[in-house]
Image (spheres, helix red, strand yellow):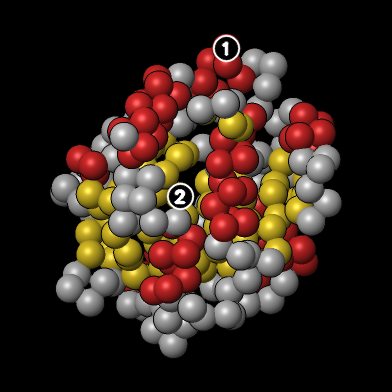
């Protein structure tokens, strides 16, 4: 397993508006699935993959996440106090905590079955060929998620935008080279800008997840995720 990727950004700053009343008084990453917070499901993956440096970003009801992580002094926090910086701006702000080199990123609003997605990414990462490696799943296999897919992939694993045709859904886990962030002057922006650059240069790749995935971005996703986990345990 390549050792040049040893830092992860866990995104946990969003408002969780699709959760309705469930996030009126608590941040989405602390919603529980199978008696564990979504954030803990994500951190368990990072711990099991042996990631040495973990950074979590915060904004909405950040004090609750700070208290929740009080027993984890090994986790660094990147506070987006004034405004949510989106994925690109949030990652750019966190770079001093993450260090140099490629990083893993992981959304905290999903659960997984099958192979640890972070280990799967690390095993497939090839920095000589790749600037981005995104974990994907055919759209019909996703749980708790709508849409026909975000990307299509060729036989070599290179990806491009699906453009409305059936394709593969991005699962919120990736390895990404961060060099290009310094060239973006904006404070608030999406990582789509780095993806589009990597796609244009033929250096954006996809990897199909060896397992299932459920988006827990809306109330119905909680039951769907718990059902998926029960099926995997059975």
Relative to 44, 83 lies left or right: right
Q: Which residue is mark 2?
A: 172
**Alpha carbon of mark 1 to alpha carbon of mark 2: how far?**
24 Å
Name the image quarter holding residue 180. bottom right
Asked if residue 182 can be seen in this view, the reply is yes
Residue 226 placement (x, y as % from top left): 41, 27
Residue 125 position (above or below residue 12) = below
Q: Is residue 180 visible?
A: no
Q: Secondary structure at mark 1?
A: helix
Q: Is residue 54 above or below residue 197?
A: above
107 on left or right of 75: left
Q: Residue at x 79, y 56 (%)?
A: 74
Determine the residue positioned at 42% across, 44% down: 112
Residue at the top extreme of this rendering? 21
- Report x, y in % for residue 114: 36, 51
Q: Which residue is mark 1?
A: 21
* Residue at 51% across, 80% down: 2
Q: Residue at x 42, y 73 (%)?
A: 123
Q: Nearer the viewer, residue 134 or 74?
A: 74
- Residue 183 shown left or right of residue 228 in the figure: right
Disc 2 element: strand
Q: How many marks?
A: 2
């Amino acid at each position: 397993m390549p050792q040049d990727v040893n830092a992860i950004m866990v995104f946990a700053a969003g408002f969780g508006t699709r959760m309705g009343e469930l996030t009126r008084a608590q941040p989405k990453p602390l919603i529980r699935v199978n008696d564990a917070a979504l954030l803990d499901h994500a951190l368990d993956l990072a711990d099991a993959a042996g990631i040495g440096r973990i950074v979590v970003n915060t904004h909405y009801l950040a004090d609750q996440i700070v208290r929740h992580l009080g027993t984890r002094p090994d986790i660094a926090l990147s506070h987006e106090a004034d405004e949510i910086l989106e994925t690109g701006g949030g990652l750019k702000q966190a770079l001093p905590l993450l260090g140099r080199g490629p990083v893993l990123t992981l959304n905290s609003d999903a659960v997984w079955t099958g192979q640890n997605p972070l280990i799967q990414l690390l095993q497939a990462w090839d920095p000589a060929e790749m600037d981005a490696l995104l974990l994907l799943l055919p759209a019909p296999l996703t749980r708790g998620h709508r849409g026909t897919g975000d990307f299509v992939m060729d036989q070599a694993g290179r990806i491009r935008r699906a453009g409305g045709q059936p394709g593969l859904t991005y699962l919120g886990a990736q390895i990404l080279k961060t060099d290009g962030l310094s060239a973006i002057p904006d404070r608030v922006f999406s990582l789509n800008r780095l993806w589009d650059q990597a796609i244009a240069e033929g250096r954006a790749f996809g990897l199909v997840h060896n397992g299932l995935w459920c988006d827990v971005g809306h109330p119905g996703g909680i039951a769907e995720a718990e059902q998926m986990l029960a099926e995997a345990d059975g």
